[in-house]
Amino acid sequence: MEDIMFEGNQSLPPNVFLLAPIFQEPASIRPWAFGVLFVIYLVTITLNLILILIILCEKKLHKPVYIFLAHLLIMDIVGCTTITPRLMYSINESNIITKPACFVQVLFISFTGAMQSYILSIMATDRFLAVCHPLRYNVLLTNSRAHKVILLTVCWSSLLAGIFLVLLIGRTFCKYPEIHKVSCINMAVARLSCEDFTINSLYGIACTSLTTVTLIVVVVVTYTRILYVCLHSGPSSKGNRKALHTCVTHCLVLSLFFFSIIFLLISLRMSSSSFFPQYLQHVSDSLFYLVQPLANPIIYGVRTAEIRRSLKRFTNVFVMKCEFVQSSQMMGYPMVDTKVFCDLFGRVTWKAKMPKRYEHMALMSEEKFTSTGH
């Protein structure tokens, strides 16, 4: 198909958009920018996967609060994967993106944004029930109900994101297809259409207001009640200190989420303003997709005692297993037909048809593991 001509004798292939160039000049900075983004992406995915794996494997963490946390971390992975690989490709290769790929970005960005907002609201409600109704908590919010709540949230967020996509697909784009963002955001794409995009703008405002206002109202109401209960029942008690510690952790994540949202909205509304430099726009665009997914597993991993203990047990078992394999090799025992099964977060058991001459090695390793206090 022939290229389409735009004003100023500029031509582009049909059905493509131009994303905002980032770290293009000078050319010597591109490998460094690509490397930094790659490291951030790799660390983000690794940290989130580690916490998700711990929550899945540790039976003590099979609770509603950790079910919600696991899905929040999954949304971090989805959101980061939607943006970062495409951003690295723009730096290293080309900032041209096809319309289908752009629409997919719009869909997933809208979906993850809504999901994160609603999951944070649900987590605030969970803390409210745990602190204000501790005796009824296990009845009011079971694991089964937690999964149902997540399923409903996924369906509702998918509906909201799907409407964004439907409002875009039917449009004709006749303006020069340059998106002044590092990724395809709903309004940035809608502005390129030939028709009036008021309905896109109104729906975007309504959807953002619904999710954000819901989060703010739920957080204010629940945490006001939590503080009231903690202060009137004795703030020095162990249970209240633990509850406040958990709430502070959640507040840190909420603050980062609100901070990122505010920067993203300011960047979107002032994209054509000369008072908001382009590099600040790129930073604000990237903050929501890069910083938050990286910070969330760090905040919860550092400040949540149960996750720290589970991670420590996982590390100890892994180290002990490596020592067992190394010692068997040093003693000249071939590791054929020998299976070693480690219960990652409990007592280590050796389930294998093992020759008798190997049994003392398993017993020694198990005694060593038991002596460490596990």
Image (cartoon, rainbow, N blue to C red):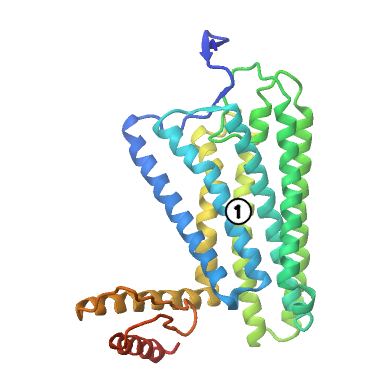
Q: Is residue 296 left or right of residue 135?
A: left
Q: Point out the image quarter for the N terminus.
A: top right
Q: Is residue 219 visible?
A: no
Q: How many marks?
A: 1
Taking the spot 66% from the left edge, 77% from the top edge, the residue there is 243
Residue 260 spot, x, y in % from top left: 59, 49
Residue 74 spot, x, y in % from top left: 58, 56
Q: Is residue 155 left or right of residue 312?
A: right
Q: Residues within 10 Å of mark 1 (few under 14, many from 20)?
A: many
The residue lying toward the viewer, choosing from 308 and 101, is 101
Amino acid tagged 1 = Met
Q: Is residue 68 left or right of residue 129?
A: left
Residue 187 spot, x, y in % from top left: 68, 32
Q: Name the element at disc 1.
A: helix
Taking the spot 45% from the left edge, 33% from the top edge, the residue there is 90
In the image, is residue 46 above or below residue 237? above
Give the quarter of the image for residue 275: top right
Taking the spot 75% from the left edge, 79% from the top edge, the residue there is 138
Q: Which residue is mark 1?
A: 75
The residue lying toward the viewer, choosing from 291 and 364, is 364
In the image, is residue 56 above or below residue 107? below
Give the quarter of the image for residue 35: top left
Q: Is residue 206 visible?
A: yes
Taking the spot 62% from the left edge, 54% from the top edge, the residue there is 257
The residue lying toward the viewer, choosing from 278 and 364, is 364
